[in-house]
Image (cartoon, rainbow, N blue to C red):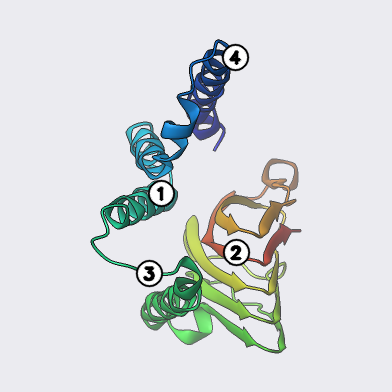
Amino acid sequence: MADNKKIKKPIIGWILIGLGMLFLIRLLGINIIGPILGQWHIGMIIVGIALLANATPDTSRTTPYVLIGLGTLFFLKSFNLFHFNIGSLILPAILIAAGYHYLRSHKNNQKAGSENSIDAVSFLSGVDNKTHSKNLAGGSITSILGGANINLTDADMAADQMEIHVFAFMGGVEIKTPLHWQVNCQVIPILGGSSNESNCLADRLNMPQKNLTIKGIAIMGGISIKN
């Protein structure tokens, strides 16, 4: 995760330098900011391509693809090839994302077996789930206008690593993990947030380290991981 951040920092630096140069040119009486801002969708495509070019095998590629897709969509719209209201796209996009997340996670849960997988769905309600399985193989958590508390402190995974897919829309998800798990959080927040406050103490506990990767989306919601 640290390597991924080191890769992306130069991109952010060049973006800041570019913005500074644009405003400096504006002070000299040359107005090019307006025309450039009018082509902001091209900027989304460029940033997406740059992130893909700098991606490592362990890096999530969801964000670059989303940027490229949205940039292409608005670029085509600028030619009046079709008409749509961005507000009208929000609900269908959320429903499609939730449906895709559920189908994907349901397929993974069937492979793992219900007793060895996490399958929590919260819709306009709250869910408290604590498992003692020592053979976990992954799972999914979906929270829509609700809350989900998943306690894994007494559980363990069958292999050295596994994935949990999370989707939170105007809801909250809290995941508690054992002290010998190393957690890699790859959550994309959209008007939401995610936090990873977990600690891996496998060496101190003289236990084999396990690796948990949490992937998902938090739309106007929050995902929290702790011990």
Q: Is mark 2 on a helix, strand or loop?
A: strand
How far across and how far down the image is residue 23, in percent? 57, 20
Task: Give the residue type at disc 1.
Answer: Leu
Crowding near pointer 3: few (<14 within 10 Å), some, many (20+)? few
Q: How far apart are marks 3 and 2 (CA)?
A: 24 Å
Is tag 3's residue or tag 1's residue first in the polypeptide sequence?
1
Residue identified by numbered label 3: 84
90 left or right, relative to 179? left
The relative height of residue 40 versus residue 114 in the rendered view (above or below) is above
**Front-lying residue, 34 or 159:** 34
Q: Position of residue 17 (x, y in %)?
A: 54, 18
Q: Is residue 176 above or below residue 142?
A: above
Residue identified by numbered label 1: 67
Look at mark 2 in the image and give the residue it sits on.
Answer: 218
Amino acid at pointer 3: Phe
- Residue wearing tag 4: 27
Q: Which quarter of the picture shows residue 152?
A: bottom right
**Quarter assignment of residue 103:** bottom left
Can the viewer see residue 177 in this picture? no
Write the residue at 72% across / 67% down: 153
Q: Is residue 116 above or below residue 24?
A: below
Whichever of callouts 2 and 4 sits on the residue coming sooner in the sequence is 4
For mark 1, give the secondary structure.
Answer: helix
